[in-house]
Image (cartoon, rainbow, N blue to C red):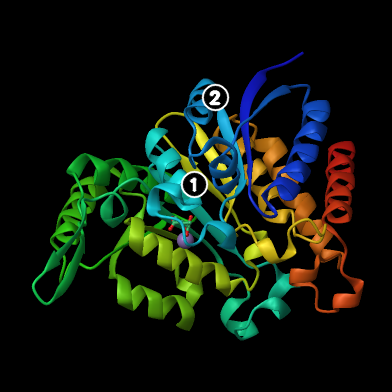
């Protein structure tokens, strides 16, 4: 037997368990084809953890994640918990695990396959060939700064602090330069340096580091202008790096260039090889349990795990290619089908992808 890796599995809520099960089926095939072994430990995060353990992020989940080489997450959240106070919301569990595990670098690719241009709401000439990566800082900024809420004469006051330490900016920016280097060597750093002090520090750090990466072409862009340019002419972008809140918004915008959030994976990386991998889409409670969810984003997230945490580039590339081939052959789940009557379910989509992975290995 070859190498062995420990994976903490967090199925979460809604369609999470269904799509995670399919990604694990794919990983099982990878074990066989690559002669490696994955040992799985299940844990709870989000709504299910609130219901069964009374907290969205149980200590047991943190402990298991710390003991593992990587985490695979489905999705968290749902209307059932929407009116809960902050400490009993599924999202709080997600933010907590990011912070606890030091997952500061969030990689969100958005790519348009030629066979999918019909799915986008934008014109073919705008979106054909889009292939970009948003790198979002994930454990700082507005999300984690001090929050205040108090009453004043005349009404309530609320504030969220946008805070960045130089070292937090430096580590995400270095990561971004490194990722850009492996892509097309073009990096856009997005900020609001004409208004925000935290952005002025951000820009200063980026400029200080840039000379260490002379092979990467760097550009600064203001976030409002970036949001506009992403829709006008997205092909100008390759790698984008930005702080937490801007990255949250821009990565959702970028995902819609492809018209299909059901296909987009993500990686949240710590220093070293550890990472948490999850689809960009949410828990989609409206279709949970129906067997029609698109497993592609989670399967591609598992591929990112192989690539970034386990160094298994070949297996990762085979999964990506298999997904492309299957979509190219016209097989679609309902969310991306042009003809809804011909849509396949979650399991059938996965079987097609698995069959394609096997045939890629046979040909190689
Ligand atoms: C995301 C989500 C989360 C975020 C929410 C669910 C807390 O929107 O992963 O982008 O804002 O980071
Ligand atoms: Mn978001």
Q: Is residue 78 visible?
A: no
Instruction: State the image quarter where residue 362 is shown.
Output: top right
- Residue mark closest to the camera, 1 vs 2: 2
Residue at 63% x, 50% y is: 13
* Residue placed under numbered mark 1 in the picture: 182
Q: Are there few (<14), some (14-19), or many (20+) residues within 10 Å of tag 1?
A: few
Q: Which residue is mark 2?
A: 64
Percent x, y for residue 29?
Answer: 82, 34
Location of residue 43 with respect to 264 vertically, above or below? above
Q: Quadrant of the C terminus?
A: top right
Is 300 on the left or on the right of 251, as rendered?
Answer: right
**With respect to residue 229, does 350 lie above or below?**
above
The residue drawn where x is 58% and y is 63% is: 79
Q: Quick one: label 2, few (<14), some, or many (20+) residues within 10 Å? A: some
Q: Quadrant of residue 160?
A: bottom left
- In screen coordinates, is 221 left or right of 347? left
Cα–Cα span, label 1 and label 2: 32 Å
Seen at 74% across and 64% down, the residue is: 287
- SS at circle 2: helix
Question: Which residue is nearer to you in this view: 205 or 255?
Answer: 255
Residue 139 x, y percent position in the rendering: 34, 45
Which callout, 1 or 2, points at the residue further toward the start of the chain? 2
In the rendered structure, find residue 198 and report the number of the disc placed on it: none
């Amino acid at each position: 037997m070859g190498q062995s890796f420990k994976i903490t599995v967090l199925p979460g809520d809604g369609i999470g368990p269904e799509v995670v099960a399919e990604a694990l089926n794919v990983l099982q095939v990878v074990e066989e084809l690559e002669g490696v072994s994955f040992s799985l430990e299940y844990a709870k995060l989000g709504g299910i953890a609130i219901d069964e353990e009374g907290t969205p992020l149980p200590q047991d989940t943190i402990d298991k994640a710390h003991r593992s080489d990587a985490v695979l997450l489905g999705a968290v959240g749902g209307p059932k918990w929407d009116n809960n106070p902050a400490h009993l919301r599924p999202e709080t569990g997600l933010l907590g695990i990011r912070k606890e595990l030091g997952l500061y670098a969030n990689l969100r690719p958005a790519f348009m396959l030629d066979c999918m241009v019909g799915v986008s709401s934008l014109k073919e000439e705008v979106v054909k060939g889009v292939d970009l990566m948003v790198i979002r800082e994930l454990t700082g900024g507005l999300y984690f700064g001090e929050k205040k809420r108090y009453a004043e004469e005349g009404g309530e006051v609320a504030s969220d602090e946008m805070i960045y330490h130089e070292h937090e900016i430096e580590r995400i920016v270095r990561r971004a330069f490194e990722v850009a280097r492996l892509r097309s060597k073009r990096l856009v750093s997005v900020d609001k340096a004409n208004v925000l002090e935290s952005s002025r520090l951000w820009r200063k750090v980026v400029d200080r580091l840039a000379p260490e990466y002379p092979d990467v072409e760097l550009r600064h862009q203001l976030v409002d202008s970036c949001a506009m340019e992403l829709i006008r002419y997205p092909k100008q972008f390759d790698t984008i790096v930005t702080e937490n809140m801007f990255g949250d918004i821009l990565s959702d915008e970028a995902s819609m260039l492809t018209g299909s959030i059901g296909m987009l994976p993500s990686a949240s990386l710590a220093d070293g090889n550890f990472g948490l991998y999850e689809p960009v889409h949410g828990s989609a409670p409206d279709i949970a349990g129906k067997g029609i969810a698109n497993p592609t984003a989670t399967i591609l997230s598992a591929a990112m795990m192989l690539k970034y945490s386990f160094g298994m580039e070949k297996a990762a590339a085979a999964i990506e290619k298999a997904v492309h081939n299957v979509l190219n052959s016209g097989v679609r789940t309902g969310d991306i089908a042009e003809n809804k009557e011909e849509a396949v379910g979650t399991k059938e989509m996965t079987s097609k992808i698995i069959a394609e992975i096997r045939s890629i290995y046979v040909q190689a």
